[in-house]
């Protein structure tokens, strides 16, 4: 903000403060300032897709004030994002709470079809094809977690033994491992 655009000097300065990155990262960050696209007085928000996705998918009451303010500002700047946030939160609430109210999923898919973004409409179309499976997941208490855990364990053992032994030894190790 003081007008220094020398990446090497800035890197040395912030490394003394604990920065562990390299000069190329600082150089990439400074590029818009050199082109004049960003006024030197405006701080750049450090937003990533992962961070914003986390804000959207987390329960609103679990967001701190800074996160809530950041998401609100993004939604004000982009009305399409605000719509997407609303639909994503409605779907997440259904899945998290296993709300299987009659037609709740159908209402969500119809709303998305009418005024959702193209990507959301694509998601809703895929969900419409697998509606029975999704409805079963929302209504039943059964889970495939134990099966998935065993599949992961078997795959790990198989990877560990790759190229070292034959099938009989792999079978024995799978059967004897806890």
Image (tube, helix red, strand yellow):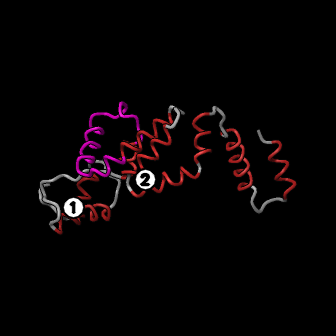
Disc 2 crowd, CA 10 A, few/some/many (<14, 14-19, 20+):
some
Disc 1 crowd, CA 10 A, few/some/many (<14, 14-19, 20+):
few
Which label number is shown at residue 120?
2
Residue found farthest to the right: 168
Q: Residue at x 39, y 51 (%)?
A: 114
Quarter holding residue 62: top left
Q: Classify mark 1: helix, strand or loop.
A: helix
Towards the viewer: 108 or 138 = 108
Task: Give the label, 2 or 1, closer to the camera.
Answer: 2
Image coords of residue 77 (percent x, y): 23, 51
Quarter holding residue 66: top left
Pointer 2 and pointer 1: residues touching (CB < 8 Å)? no
Towards the viewer: 161 or 174 = 174
Q: Is residue 6 magenta?
A: no
Q: Earlier in the sequence, mark 2 or mark 1?
A: 1
Q: Is residue 170 left or right of residue 146?
A: right
Q: Is residue 168 left or right of residue 10?
A: right
Image coords of residue 163 (percent x, y): 77, 63
Towards the viewer: 103 or 172 = 103
Which SS type dominates the magenta stretch? helix
Q: Classify mark 2: helix, strand or loop.
A: helix
Q: Which residue is mark 1?
A: 9
Number of marks? 2
Provide the residue span drawn in magenta: 57-84
**Quadrant location of the C terminus in the rendered image:** top right
Q: Residue at x 85, y 53 (%)?
A: 169
């Amino acid at each position: 903000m003081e007008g220094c655009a020398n990446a090497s000097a800035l890197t040395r300065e912030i490394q003394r403060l604990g920065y562990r990155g390299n000069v190329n990262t600082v150089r990439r960050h400074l590029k818009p300032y050199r082109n004049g696209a960003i006024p030197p007085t405006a701080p750049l928000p450090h937003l990533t897709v992962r961070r914003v996705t986390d804000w959207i998918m987390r329960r609103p009451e679990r967001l701190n004030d800074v996160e809530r303010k950041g998401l609100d500002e993004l939604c004000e700047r982009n009305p399409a994002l605000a719509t997407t946030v609303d639909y994503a939160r409605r779907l997440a609430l259904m899945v998290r709470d296993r709300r299987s109210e009659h037609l709740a999923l159908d209402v969500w898919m119809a709303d998305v079809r009418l005024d959702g973004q193209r990507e959301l409409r694509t998601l809703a179309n895929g969900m419409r094809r697998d509606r029975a499976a999704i409805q079963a997941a929302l209504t039943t208490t059964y889970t495939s977690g134990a099966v998935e855990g065993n599949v992961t364990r078997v795959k790990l053992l198989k990877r560990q033994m790759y190229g070292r032994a034959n099938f009989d030894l792999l079978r024995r190790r799978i059967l004897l491992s806890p």
